[in-house]
Structures are given as C-alpha cells and as structure tokens.
Amino acid sequence: MKIALMDSGIGLLAAAAEVRRLRPDAELVLSSDPDGLPWGPRTPEDVTRRSLTVAEAAAAHRPDALIVACNTASVHALPALRARLEPGLPVIGTVPAIKPAAASGGPVAIWATPATTGSPYQRGLIEEFAGGVAVTEVPCPGLADAVQYADERAIDETIAAAAALTPRDVRVVVLGCTHYELVAERIRAAVQQPGLPPLVLHGSAGAVAAQALRRIGELPGARPAAVPPGLTVLLSGRAEPLPQAALTYAEGRMLAAVSPAL
C-alpha cells in the first residue's frame, strides 16, 4: 500500500505520521512546493495551478490514495484535483475540525491563517456545525511560515500574539492550518489558563489519515512487509531527502527513523 500526501510545505508531516501510526507498513510519498511558498497570499487560481502540479508529481509514483494535507489547497483546489485524478486516484481533502470542536459546547477558538480567518469557507463551516456555540476566529499571521522554517523565535512570538487574541475562557482550539499541528503542545501551553480544565486541541491529521484508509478499503493495523516501507520526498517535483527543518519536529524524526529514503 502506498499513500501520497501533498501540501505547500511541511504541514503534511502531521498527517503522514498518523498514516504511519495507523499502518506502519504503508509506503509514503510526500509532495510539497518549497519553490512556491507561501500559498496563502496567492490567488485561488494560482493555488489551484500549483496544487495540480504538486499532486501530479505525487500521482506519478502511483499511490493508492492522495491526501491533500493543506487547508488552503483543500479550500481552493479540491474540486480541480478530484476532476483531474479521480476516480483512478482517491483524493482526500482536509477540513478544519470545527464540527467535533463545537460538539463540546464551547467556547471555541479557531486558529487559522489570515487568508482563511473570516473567509466565506470558514464562516460557512461555523454556521453549519457551530450554531449556538461561542466561536472566536483567531488570525495567526506568520505562524505557518515560522513552523515551515523551524524559526524558534518566530514560533514563540506568533503563538504568543495569537494567544493574546484568544478569549481566556476558551476551552477548545481548532488548529485550522496543518502546520500548526506540529507545534500543538506549544499552542496548548500558551492558551491554557491556570485553574481551568485542560485545553482540548482539535487537528485534522488523524481524521484524514483514517479517511484515506477507508477510501481504499484498508483497516488500521500493521501488515507483514518483506522490506521496510519507503519514504519518497518530492520538493517542487524533485526527489530530495526530508528538509532539515522537518527533522526539528517529532513527526519528521519519526518518519525519517523508520522509513528508508527511496
């Protein structure tokens, strides 16, 4: 079994690690676009064009499914990706986990990129799944870029700025960008208020990994493998090792440790 994941950058590590956790025998193809970063400020048409290029680079490796591990690409390019690749290649998009977060009753904060915060797409999800729940949309300018380049100072500063915009009574935070899942515990530490119940974070990595397996009729659990599963890394179409910045995160180190590069 081979699962491909695509993103603008290393935000796909969280979902890739979840796939590897659910199916340690799965080969992985990680396709990103460091030459085109960041995607957030680009027009929807440009995001779609770049997403198709990144997806087709992954599809050339003949995976069984493709996870679009990027909120921006899922918002703007998912219909085009499915029109181009399905039904031969199932395409699984990423949706912010607003529905399960709202089920807690709130209050809820949604951390997202400035382009996504307040967008018709996100507002539509809030109206559909979080009616009657107190929801605060929190823009996080610069956080995805700081995570992408493992800039420790910038990560601390951007998380602190977003935490200052988050109401103190928030009990649930939706991580509305896949990059944010790589620094989830740092976000938790910044938002958690003394004396209040533990903060709950909702990301999308686990859900999209499980959905990818369902789409191809597979179940979680290891399968015997004659050789260790492979890891193919494509950076703007070029076969490369995992970027050094990826190895600063637990998810990247786990993937590198158990997956010989092809």
Image (cartoon, rainbow, N blue to C red):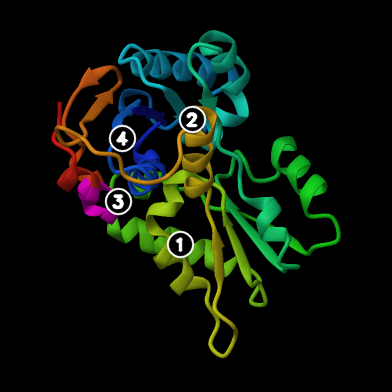
How far apart in space, not on screen, are marks 1 and 2 (Cα)? 25 Å
Query: How far from the left and from the top, in percent, is residue 186?
Result: 40, 66
Image quadrant for the N terminus? Answer: top left
Mark closer to the observer (1, 2)? 2
How far apart in space, not on screen, are marks 3 and 2 (Cα)? 17 Å
Name the amino acid type tagged 3: Glu
Residue at the disc numbered 1: 159
Residue 251 numbered mark, or none:
3
State the residue at coordinates (71%, 36%). Answer: 121
Compare marks 3 and 2 and give the one earlier in the sequence.
Answer: 2
Query: Is the residue under label 3 in contact with that under label 1 (CB below 8 Å)?
Result: no
Q: Which residues are magenta?
A: 247-254
How far apart in space, not on screen, are marks 1 and 3 (Cα)? 20 Å
Mark closer to the observer (1, 3)? 3
Name the amino acid type tagged 4: Ala
Compare marks 1 and 2 and give the one earlier in the sequence.
Answer: 2
Residue at the disc numbered 4: 26
